[in-house]
Image (spheres, grey):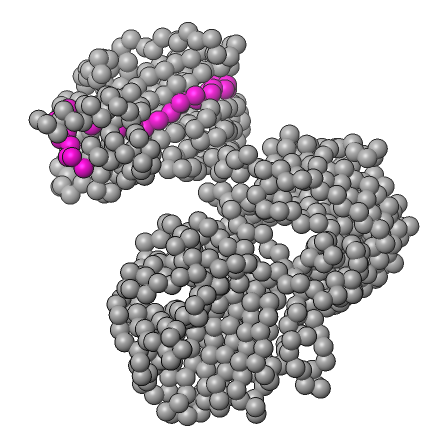
Amino acid sequence: MRTHKKSILSALVSAAVLTASFPMQTAKADIVIDHDCSGVDKGYYYEIKNNDKDSQPEFLIDALGGYSCNWDNDEDFMVQRGPKFTEPVNYTELKNYSCNFWKSVDIEKFKDEDEGYVRFGFRMKNTKGDTFTIMEYEDVASSKVLSTEDGYSEIGTCYAREALNYNSITDMTKKEWYTIYSKENEDNTKSVICSRKVPFSKGDYQNLCLSDILQAVADAGIDPGDLTGVNIFVEGAHSKGSARVFTSYYKGDTRPDKVWEDWEDPEAPIVLKGGDYGIRTGYYYKLTQLRNGGYMEVLSPSLFKAEWDSTDMPYHYDGPTFGRGKSYDQGQSYKAVSGSSVDYTMNFDAEGSYFVETYARMVGPDLPEYELDTEVHIVDAINEWVKRDWDEMIGEVTADGKKYEAHECSVTKIGTGSPQKTETYYFISEDAEENGKKGTVTVKHDLAPFMEFLHDHGAILGEPDCILVRLDGDVSKGTAELVKNEVTIPDFIPDDHEYDKEKRRIALGGINTETTVYGEDYRIVGSESTMKGFNGEKIDCDWQLIPSKSPGVDMDESPRRFYIGDEKIQNSDGSIGYIEKDSLLIDYEIDMGEVTSTKKKPAWIIGGTIICGKIFDNVELTEDDYSSTTIVVADKWDGDPLNALGPLYSTHRDAEEFGVIESNGVKYDAVKILPKDKSKNSPYIVLMRQEQLEAVDAADVPEGYSRYAGTIDARDIVDKINDLGYRTFSIGSAYFSLTTVRNEGSATVGKAELRRVPSDDTVFTAEDVQKLSDFILGKDPYIPYLTSYDLNGDGVWDSFDLCAMRKRVEK
């Protein structure tokens, strides 16, 4: 889950000496430093050293630990910034600790051919005073780099995992190599340099695993000990240049807290002229704006004054916003928002398009398709409301004795990383327009009715971030004053694994949609169909008749197909295209509801779909071979199962029976449907079970439904088809499938699993026995992907499998 974005206004201004030409400004202003100083700003440590009395390097601090700087120095200077831990943390506790950052270092010139240098990287110190430098970039006018100075010696090499564009550290495969140098200092401290062998690239976010390097230093014989923090530094001398650093997060399996600075006078008003946010006197504040033009005075204890002019904004909803309220502790349920209340009064004098609201934001969860945020706007005052083109009214809520129109307006942004989706909901009060005309609004909100509506609507509600009284300046100009603001939030409410469950959500609909959740593929082929549920739980499938777009034709005859399985079957060595002899079992259980059919050849099939392909095999095709084949296993059907495949008469020949196969004690009639043009279409092989599945009698079958359960051995079926003289090549995909045509209905898939069961002649090693034993005893829950230890085929790994495995080792 992504980390909340929180900050505190700068203490840097008071720590720096400013020239007369640079008056005191907010933390977003350029600050000229002409002496050494350090401190904590927005929760991140900073340090500046400038030993050139004739230079004035500029240092601009951004949120989330980022900064920019430029310099024109003869003597040396250094800037660094990063999280400072609330208390020292031993390096062994930083599991998979990484920084996701973007950087740019531009050197305009070196002033001295022997002494000029510029360096960039990470720097950490421990409680003993030892310094650990990860040198990402080093440019020198001469050939003498820092690690060649007197006293340094090479003690080893190491690598750190790295990826681009927000990828997870634990998923990385790329390795960046470093050379490790160390030296003893006169004060008995150590200096360690880990120098990157290939200089860093520009223009992309990079995620570097810092704990990899710390562990490598320890392996080389130097104990990193207890660390006080992490800093990204830029330093140089006899040079002119600039640098920019953006950090999106520092995180790992354990993530030390940052230090938040103490205020000298927390009651004093502060002024914001650029976008900023933080906490003051216990209340969160935030000013956002795409360009300057907004002014915000943060008043104690929970109030603000605002002035703005956004009349030149080209688009609506891009104007400045001013907010004051509460922020939530991380890790809570959305129910913390439900338990919150807001009681406020705001006066305003403005013209143009703007609105006043109670605003709540929730972060995550990060889903396979996108990273999600949710925004809730309870609009209490409006002037010249502008509706977005993609705004959809989704209902009405009665709360606080008033009626509110509910609107949904979601936006997805696509860039180099994961798509960013914001689900935005507006609740517009019936008094909003009147309050907008009066220029004042007094409201008390309990958030529960609004959140309950969204939960019932099916909104994905993530981890609470903040709840604010907010004015959105949109396209307008004016002034406003928040004169009363009491925000109440409940005690900590844990999420109870709600977000983990959302990561397992399946919500498919539309035409030909698919998703992959925890390694399992879900697909719908066709339109007017939905597939909803959670991975590992029951999945609901619904389909409607498809209206035809052709004049004089009642409906579209295209089939609808629901697939659950694996789109790319791998062998134990990771290669694609399953050729191993272990059984590949498709286990399923489905409750079929009532199906409403048309009069024109309706049909449906329950069973499996196996797709085989030449693309994975290193063998030549003969003139009788087909490069790919779709095998449909029909265990239960209604109507003619061949009709369920859709209108193949224009592209394929008539069906041709070519034999009977028996798999797992079940006999199937095999039918070939070959294409007329083999270069354009693939053949179908339909296996129709001679004795169809009977319904299962169970107490939990819903009324009006019939349950069917079956097991298909995809490996055995393909082998048996090959025995009939048809060459299928390797298995590319295997699914449980429900196929239907010319009808509408619903079904619930209770189970759809793809399992591997080792063949009888598989031999195991003593190492396999130890791995399975450790797994059963809970000593090691991690078994390599694609491992098959289910020897008796019951779907679990237990002592029965362990006993069977030991016998095979003895043999």
**Residue 766: x, y in percent?**
16, 35
Tell me what residue is drawn at x 29 percent, y 70 percent.
Answer: 179
Q: Please count the marks in the image.
A: 0
Residue reaching furthest left?
811
- Locate residue 265 relative to residue 649 in the image: left or right: right
Q: Judge left or right: residue 245 versus residue 798.
A: right
Residue 607 horizontal/vertical position (percent): 34, 20
* Residue toward you, 489 or 728: 489
Q: Is residue 756 magenta-colored?
A: yes
Secondary structure mostly seen in magenta is strand
* Image vertical order of residue 765 relative to residue 11, above or below: above
The quadrant holding residue 144 is bottom left
Residue 747 lies in the magenta stretch = yes
| Residue at image coords 25%, 31% | 773
* Residue that appears at 20% across and 32% down: 769
Res 271 → quadrant? bottom right
Q: Give the extent of the magenta segment.
A: 738-767
Q: Which residue is drawn at 53% across and 43% down?
A: 365
Q: In this view, does 67 lie above or below 768?
A: below
Q: Is 705 located above or below residue 395 in the figure?
A: above
Foreground: 328 or 166?
328
Can residue 41 be seen from the camera position used here?
A: yes
Residue 477 shows up from this direction: no
| Percent position of residue 446, x then y | 76, 37
The answer to whether 463 is drawn above or below residue 279 in the figure is above
